[in-house]
Structure formats: C-alpha cells, structure tokens
Image (spheres, coloured by chain):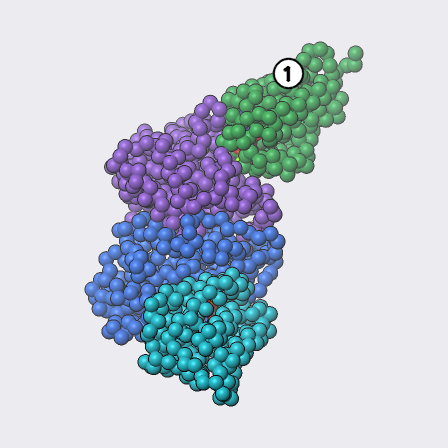
Chain colours: A green, B purple, C blue, D cyan
C-alpha cells in the first residue's frame, strides 16, 4: 500500500485555481443553463467569485489549508452575491473550520471538510436532495468519497469516483421539478433542464480531483 | 426566431452598474452620494440621529429601484448588486453602519433566495456590531404559489410602496417596531402579478434570457428576466388586465368598498402610452370589482432592464397608509410635496 | 434581419390614443380632464380668468408629452393627434377656447410641416373668434440643418423645457408677451441631438419604421421613428455622448462658466440604468467643455413609442430661467414643489 | 364633335369614393413609402381622411359640386392632421370656391379647380417643383390637363393624360433630394425613394379620371 501523500495549503490553492479556470471555460454554458430556469447570471457569478478567490489566495501558499478555505469562503461571500455566493461561501468556511490550523490534511479529513460544506449548504439553503439544487450533486459526491476513503482508496482515486457521482447527480436534476431557488418559480416548467448550481458543483469536484492528483 | 441583439448604451459590460450609479450621484448630489468602494448609495444627510433608517438592495437592472429611491421620506441607503444578482453582505453591512442613527435600521428584503441569505449574513454581522436591525421580507407576487415546493412568493411591486410608506413613517419619527410593522403591513395588504411581452438582455450575457414566439406572452413573470409560470397568446389589453386583476384580487380579497392604490408598473421597455391604456382597464375593472382606486402610480418603478411588459400591484389602503403615501417624498425616482 | 414583431398592450390599434388618454384622465382627475369629443386634455380648473394659457399638441406616441404635462405650472391643454400625426385644427381651436381666460393663449408648436400648418389654421380660426393667440415654434434639433433645403430644425427636447418654464411664468401672472418671449428664449437657448438604437413600431403600421443591421445606430433622429441623418457603428457610451455633446455644444456655444440644464431623455425603450450611465458621461463632458450642469432632467419625457435611444438637450440657463425651472409644477409627468 | 357631358355633384361624390377605395387598397404601400423617408403614417392618414369625406358627402348628391368640394376639404382638414391633411384640405376648398354654387362644371372649369388646388398647396406648403412633394405629381398633371382641354379634348380623355403625367411626376421624385416636409430631415438619404404624397396624388388623379369617365 502506497504511503498517502499529505495534502496542504498548496492543494487548496491549486483547487481554487482549477475551479477558476474550469468555471471560466464553462461560463457561457452555466449562464445558458441559468437562463433556461433562472436569471442567467450563474456563469458570471461563479467566475467573478473564484477569480477573486484566486487573487485573494495569491502568495498565501504557506498558510494552513483550513485558513485558506475560510479565506476563500469569505471571498466568495463578499464577491458573488446571489444564491450561490452565500451557499458555496459558507460551505468553504465550514469546511475550513474542520481543519483548524493543521498544516496538512489526509483523505479522511477531506471527507470531513466536504461533509461540513454540504451540511452548511443544506442548513443555509434548506434544500433536500431532489429539490433540484447543488445539493443533488454535492451529496452523492460526499457519500461516494466517504465510502471510498473508508474502503482505503487514495484521495485522488476516491475523488475521481466522487466527481463521477457529482456528475451523475447533476444529470439526475434534469427530470426534477425545482423546489428551491429561482427555478422553483417556474413550477413544472423547470422540468427537463439541468440545474446550473449542480453543474458548477460537479466542476468544483472535478477541479478538486485534479488538484489532489497533482499534489500526489 | 432570430436572436435579438444587444443594443445598449454602455462602455464595458462589467462596469454598467458602477457607471450608472456614478451618473445617479452626479445628477442628484443634493439627495445622495455614491460610495463606490462599498458599492452603496447613501442619503446625503445620513446618518440622522434618532431617526430609524431604512435600507434596501438587490440585484441591479430594476432602476429606479433601489438607488433611485434614496432621499427624503424613503430610503436612507441602497445596496445595488450586479445586474439581477443579489448584493453581497459587505454592502448591506456598510450601508447599515452608514445610516444607523442609533434608532435602528430596517432592512427591506425582496424574497429571493440570494437576497434573503445575503441580507441575513449582513444582519448577523450588524448585530455583532451592536446595531439593531429588523429585516422584513417582501413577498407579494401571486404568480408564485407560497408552498413547501417553492422558494415562496417573490418580492416585486410592493417593495416600492413599502419603501415609500415606511420611509414616510420613519421620517415622521416612528420607532423601529412601528417602521418594521409598517413595512409588514404594506406587504400583507399588497399583491402583484406581472406579464412580459419580451425578454430582456442582461449586459453580461449579451443575449435574451428567453425567446418568445410571435404573438405569445409570459404570464406570471418576476423582475429578473426569468420566464413566467406559463405562456399564453397575446390577447387584447382588456384580456391581459382581466388576468392580472383576477390574479391579484382573488388573492387579496379586499372587502367591497375598500380603498386601494393601483400601481401599474412598466418593466422598462413598454412605453407610457401603453401603461396608461392598461390603467384605463385596471381602473374600470377594480371599480367593477367593488373597490375604489383612490391613489395610483403609473410608470417604470421596478423594472427588468429593457423588458417589454407590465405588472399590477394593488395595495389595500387604510387611513394610516394613505396618509403616509401622501406624505412628502423627494428622491430621484419619486417626488411630491417637496 | 428578421422582422421585429409588434408586441403591445392594446385593444384595437385604431383606439390606442383615445384609450390611453382615458387612462390618463382616470388616473389624474385632480389635475385634468379628457374631452373625448374634442380629443383634447384640459387642465381641471381651466379657464383661469386673467391667466395666460398655454397649449401644445402634436402627434401621439411621445408620452408623457403633451397630455402628461397638463396641470399646475405647465400646460393648460394638450391636443394629441393620432400616433406621429399632427392633430387637426379643430382640436387646437377647441383647446384654445377651453382655456382662454381673457389674457390670451400661447401655442407651443414643434417645428414639423404638419404641426405648423394645422396650428396656423387653428390660430386663424381663434383670431376670428376674438381670442389673442401667440404661436411660438420650437426648433432645437441640431441634427437638421436649418437651411432653404429643409423644413428647418425639428422641435424636440426643448419643448418639454419650454412648457415647464413658460408654464411657470404664466402661473406667476406674466402677460402674453412675456410668456411668449419665455418660450422663445428657451428655444433660442436650447439645442438637442438624438440617437436611436432601434426603430419603434407604430400601432397602425404594425412593423418597425426602419431596420437597423446588427451593431448599427441611427444618429440625428427625431421623435417620429424617422431614420436619422446617418448610420454609424454602435460605439461605447462614451463615444456616443461625445457625438451628442459635440453636436449640441458646437451649435449652442455657451460662454465658459455658463450654467446649463442637461436633459438626458429616453426614447421609450431604453431603461433608466442606461440613461444614468449616459448622464455620467454627459456631466463629465459638459464640465470639461467649461459649463456647469446645475440642473438636470433624466428620464422618458419626449419619446418615440418603444424606440431604444436617447437624446441630449442642453439649455443655457440664466437667473430667470433657473427660477422658473425651480418653480412648483404638478402634472402627471413632472412634479415638484407641490 | 360629341357634346360635352356636364359634370356635377355626383361626379365629385364618385371622385371621392374612387379616391377612398384606391388609397385604402394602397394603404400599406403608401405607409411603406412614408416609412422609408417619413414617419410611416401617410397611408393611414389619407385612408382615414377620405373615408370621413365619403361619409360626410353621403346623401349630399344634389348639392352643388363646389359646395361638395369645400365640404370634402373641410373634412380632410378636420380628420387627417399631419402635412397632407391641411394641404389637400385647403386644395379641395380652394378648388370648390372656383365653382361657386354652379350646379355643373365643364372641362375648362375642371382645369381651374385643379389649378386652384395646386396654387393652394404651393402657397401653404411653400414647395416648389423638384422639392420632392405632392407638387411634383400635381403640377405636371394640371399643366397637361390645361393643354389637352385647350386643344379640345374631352375631360375623361384629358384626365387620362393628366393622370399619366402625375404618375410620371411621381416616379420622377425618386432621384430627388427632399427639401420640404419630413423627408428633408434625411438630407441625401432621401434620394432613391418615391415620395408618398406624390404617390397618393397620382392615385387621386386616376380616381378623378374614373369618376369623370363614369359620368360621361
Ligand atoms: N435554497 C437553495 N439551496 C441550495 N442550493 C440552491 C438554493 N437556491 C438556489 N440554489 C442553487 O443556486 C443556483 C443558482 O445560483 P445563482 O444563479 O448564482 O444565484 P441566483 O439564483 O441568485 O441568480 C441554483 O442552480 C441552485 O443550484
Ligand atoms: N411643404 C410641403 N409642401 C407640399 N407637400 C408637402 C410638404 N410637406 C410634406 N408634403 C407632402 O406630404 C407628404 C407626407 O404626408 P403625411 O405623411 O400624411 O404627413 P406627415 O409628414 O405630417 O406625416 C409628403 O410625402 C409630401 O408629399
Ligand atoms: Mg442566477
Ligand atoms: Mg441572480
Ligand atoms: Mg405624420
Ligand atoms: Mg407621414
């Protein structure tokens, strides 16, 4: 069994950079999804937010990863607005608090970070699975990650499965009728469209996979 | 259908909101100032010691809401987000601090997930700083069912009326509870319903949010360019107003003989000639329904960029609300008696 | 380019003007009444004995002009024609008779062949009836060269300013000569230039008057949906304002240090967020040109149905004009101090 | 040489009816011409006006033709607005005054009626030939009619030539740059478009030819 490589602040920074380039590349697609059942700003929102995060984290490479996550969360709250800003903002802050001032974290701690992020989103947004929100991508990803890590998988491998679960969850939002957020105003007309927030969440998981794989 | 192209007076799409606010401040230095660092619009003479302050905010693209309602007898500050995007808590916190005169601050929050969450975070921070904040959520849009299966009713036209009426209460020296209760009362006694004849084009997106096939309209729209509850054939103005009045009145259910304020609001791209034509129908139908529109407001007050469309808000008046409505107001967007 | 379809709140296209005026009257019974037989809008308390009366009129589709400017401190009556069609002399005659309080009646006429001819016929008839009429033609649009080879400059934004300012003069008891001279002075000291980003759709025609290829704008438009002097690429707001300010200022030539009123007018389909963004540029450029915009007016006041576009009017103020501008006005479209 | 048939009030009424049905049929075309270089209302204006004229003249068949023309002109002034209302309105009033209370009129009087109409339009509108207005259709028509009648032609035949002259004048407005009316605002951009008022004037002349031919 290979020795598990420690994840650290650099991993968090590279995660945020990966998110930033990924949502920037998919900006128009995310906005288009949000135009169908929302107000057409999701791509701009997350691009603006993660660009600010990357900037805020610049030169903070040696800070403990928990602090970096908290700073990233705060930056999202302060720059995104909308629904996704507070949701992913408090998610990253809660995730960061799990790590305290620890200079590194392992696979099990990563599970706890993402579980705290999920709990925070669910508490703030009061969304349950099946409501057609980012929760539908994040919850299956956290469950999968927890299971794989418990079964002894390496973080990068476990994240590959988790990201796939997020994508499956994202795709599964298509037939749902939205019960939370703007899309809920559409009633039955929300059926047949993929949730933008679940889509960016799947991108965020894939970005994490890449960041962790690169750290290993 | 061919794609409608963006034709806007702007420089960089990313700076539309900031540049427009700079224009607002340049035009009305006697009423307000624009703090571009904090991205807030603040009443010139704020904070006023002992006066309850009112702030509101939300995505931009709804002008004159909210920045255009800062001034005497209305808002003490406005927090404009990006176009159709809720502002961030930092803005609401900065605004709350800038206007607090010791008597507390009322947050008027339109009921959208993002607005509610961002305002909530700001209120928590303000409380940490020892400022009394009372947040009231506006949710007057009858197009959305208020059920477990939605984010609840949206806040639309009643927001303008609440800002005016509660602003008058605050100006007259009412305390925090009274001003909050006034906002609540306006919200409880007002209902709205909107209709779109075209989509709008958010500057950052550069294209319409939805396309409407020829001769169709969206019924039950909000103010963020989002599609409505359903599509219908564009009927006559009389038929459209039937739908609006029926939707609003069947929910509001004011007793016969009630006095109401009828607010016919343009969404930004519908000219005044049409709004007055709609008002003719509204006035007639409200009277036929047994209520008397003793006050009215007709024009573009809570808009969706250049969307063609209109909304109807009916406020069930009482003596108090009527008196506060008639009280002087002097803001860029609403002015009388001053 | 695909044809833009008509999406309007209306019943029968032939009744748009009448039904909209009925709505205006229903909304503002304290200010005005609508005489549907004579097709005129008359101030509630007209005729006022001893007061010089002001009337204006022109095609409809420019709302709030003129009907929305009837009331205290502005017009005594308005004569709305069909959409973009000058009213007929019968209307101006009926209005003149309805408002004459013995001190004479000023006709404010926008310089269009049709308006001028129809008003002239009415003035002749009124003179036959023994009413003193003084007709002043407004021609402030610098996009049109005033030469033997044109019908002369069009009357556009200065009309709103003249109605407000001369209305204040009349309200304060000035005599016929003084009120007429005030209209003339506003016209001489004001210049305008307009830009369109889209055509409008007259209800009777049901389709746009012109099609603009993607990314192009019309420079030097009037208010009747007519094409402008030339087409250009849609540049930044800063570039568009450069053209407008240059066109207006090079013709008006106010001395350095002059005080001016800057009027940024929306054509009907351009939202307020853009008008304020334009104002930011206008304010900066006027100051750079050495004049001080001490007053401003920003919004839809003289429109072309739902046309997207804007016009700039600059009025070179003096103490008298400033005082009259600030005087109370209470009309559906313009209100302050009352 | 055939005896010239007297023209009378019925001729005037039938002229107005012919105009009404002709401009109604061409309404959209006239409006389209006016959209190119004006404000897109000419078709509606003349249709509304002549419909009112036909209604006003209903049952006035026995009135003297001069009176009918004056009534028609007044009705145009009171119902059209715009530029064309006062212009054609005073034209018909001036034309009517030429006939006084005479119960009939002949070809020579018809020349005088139309000449008075033309003079009235030129006076009120201050337009010269070549300014790209209705004058460019009416003036050649009046000249042609005068010549033909002087040469002994029957009214109907003379009118056929006059109407053709009006149409030629109308077509000749295409290359002109407008100097009067709304089209003048366009400057050089008015070149290449046919003047709407000249076009309706040609229709008015053709209508007169049909009305007179039917009376003969
Ligand atoms: N109550 C909620 N709980 C969880 N996620 C939510 C909730 N409301 C909205 N969302 C998510 O937010 C996304 C929209 O984000 P965004 O477009 O940035 O904000 P807004 O809706 O304010 O414009 C939705 O697609 C959805 O996934
Ligand atoms: N000064 C003038 N003299 C003669 N004819 C004119 C003059 N001005 C305009 N016209 C005619 O009037 C026509 C336009 O009529 P119409 O569209 O009904 O009025 P408006 O221009 O007021 O909309 C033009 O095509 C032209 O033939
Ligand atoms: Mg969104
Ligand atoms: Mg949004
Ligand atoms: Mg016209
Ligand atoms: Mg015309």
Percent x, y of residue A46? 60, 34
- Whether D119 is drawn above or below B198: the answer is below
Percent x, y of residue D48? 42, 63
Residue B256 falls in image quadrant: top left
Q: Nearer the viewer, residue D170 or B102?
A: D170
Q: Which residue is mark 1?
A: A143
Residue D178 seen in the current view: yes
**Disc 1 secondary structure class:** helix
Residue at 60% across, 18% down:
A115
Q: Residues within 10 Å of mark 1 (few under 14, many from 20)?
A: some
Residue at 36% across, 45% down:
B281
Residue at the far left in the pictured view? C49
Cβ(mark 1) to ligand 1 < 8 Å? no
Describe residue A37's horizontal placement relative to residue B314 as left or right. Answer: right
Percent x, y of residue D78? 35, 67
- Whether B225 is drawn above or below D154: the answer is above
Q: Nearer the viewer, residue C335 or A93?
A: C335
Q: Nearer the viewer, residue A110 or D147?
A: D147
Q: Nearer the viewer, residue C203 or B4?
A: C203
Residue at 49% across, 48% down:
C7
Describe residue B2's horizontal placement relative to residue C66 as left or right. Answer: right
Q: Chain of mark 1?
A: A
Residue A208 seen in the current view: no
Residue at the far front in the pictured view? D2
Describe residue A32's horizontal placement relative to residue C126 as left or right. Answer: right
Percent x, y of residue C254? 45, 68
Describe residue C117's horizontal placement relative to residue D200 as left or right. Answer: left
Residue A14 falls in image quadrant: top right
Residue at 46% across, 36% down:
B220
- Whether B63 is drawn above or below A145: the answer is below
């Amino acid at each position: 069994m290979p020795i598990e490589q420690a994840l650290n602040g650099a991993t968090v920074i590279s995660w945020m950079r990966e998110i930033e380039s990924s949502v920037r590349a998919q900006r128009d697609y995310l906005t288009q999804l949000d135009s169908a059942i929302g107000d057409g700003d999701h791509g701009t929102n997350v691009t603006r937010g993660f660009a600010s995060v990357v900037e805020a984290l610049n030169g903070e490479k040696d800070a403990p990863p928990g602090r970096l996550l908290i700073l990233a969360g705060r930056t999202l709250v302060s720059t995104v607005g909308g629904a996704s800003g507070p949701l992913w903002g408090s998610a990253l802050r809660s995730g960061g608090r799990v790590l305290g001032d620890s200079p590194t974290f392992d696979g099990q701690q990563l599970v706890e970070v993402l579980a705290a992020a999920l709990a925070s989103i669910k508490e703030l947004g009061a969304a349950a699975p099946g409501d057609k929100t980012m929760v539908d991508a994040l919850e299956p990803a956290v469950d999968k990650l927890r299971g794989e890590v418990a079964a002894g998988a390496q973080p990068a491998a476990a994240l590959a499965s988790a990201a796939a679960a997020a994508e499956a969850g994202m795709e599964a939002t298509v037939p749902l009728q939205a019960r939370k957020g703007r899309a809920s105003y559409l009633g039955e007309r929300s059926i047949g469209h993929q949730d933008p927030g679940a889509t960016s969440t799947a991108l965020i998981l894939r970005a994490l996979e890449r960041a962790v794989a690169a750290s290993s | 259908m061919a794609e409608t192209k963006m034709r806007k007076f702007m420089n960089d799409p990313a700076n539309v909101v900031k540049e427009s606010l700079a224009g607002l401040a340049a035009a009305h230095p006697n009423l307000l100032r624009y703090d571009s660092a904090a991205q807030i619009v603040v009443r010139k003479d704020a904070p006023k010691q002992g006066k309850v302050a009112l702030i509101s905010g939300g995505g931009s693209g709804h002008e004159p809401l909210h920045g255009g309602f800062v001034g005497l007898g209305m808002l003490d500050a406005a927090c404009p987000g990006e176009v159709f995007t809720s502002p961030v808590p930092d803005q609401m916190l900065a605004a709350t601090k800038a206007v607090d005169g010791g008597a507390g601050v009322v947050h008027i929050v339109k009921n959208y997930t993002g607005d509610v969450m961002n305002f909530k975070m700001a209120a928590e921070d303000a409380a940490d700083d020892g400022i009394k904040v009372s947040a009231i959520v506006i949710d007057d849009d009858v197009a959305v069912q208020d059920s477990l299966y939605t984010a609840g009713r949206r806040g639309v036209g009643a927001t303008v009326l609440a800002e005016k009426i509660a602003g008058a209460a605050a100006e007259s020296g009412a305390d925090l509870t009274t001003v909050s209760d006034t906002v609540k009362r306006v919200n409880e006694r007002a209902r709205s319903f909107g209709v779109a004849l075209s989509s709008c084009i958010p500057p950052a997106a550069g294209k319409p949010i939805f396309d409407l096939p020829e001769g169709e309209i969206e019924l039950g729209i909000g103010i963020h360019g989002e599609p409505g509850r359903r599509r219908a054939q564009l009927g006559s103005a009389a038929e459209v107003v039937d739908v609006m009045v029926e939707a609003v009145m069947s929910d509001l259910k004011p007793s016969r003989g009630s006095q109401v304020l009828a607010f016919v609001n343009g969404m930004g791209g519908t000219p005044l000639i049409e709004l007055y034509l709609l008002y003719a129908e509204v006035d007639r139908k409200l009277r036929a329904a047994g209520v008397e529109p003793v006050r009215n407001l007709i024009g573009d007050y809570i808009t969706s960029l250049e969307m063609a469309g209109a909304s109807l808000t009916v406020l069930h008046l009482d003596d108090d609300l009527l008196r506060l409505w008639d009280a002087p107001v002097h803001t860029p967007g609403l002015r009388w008696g001053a």
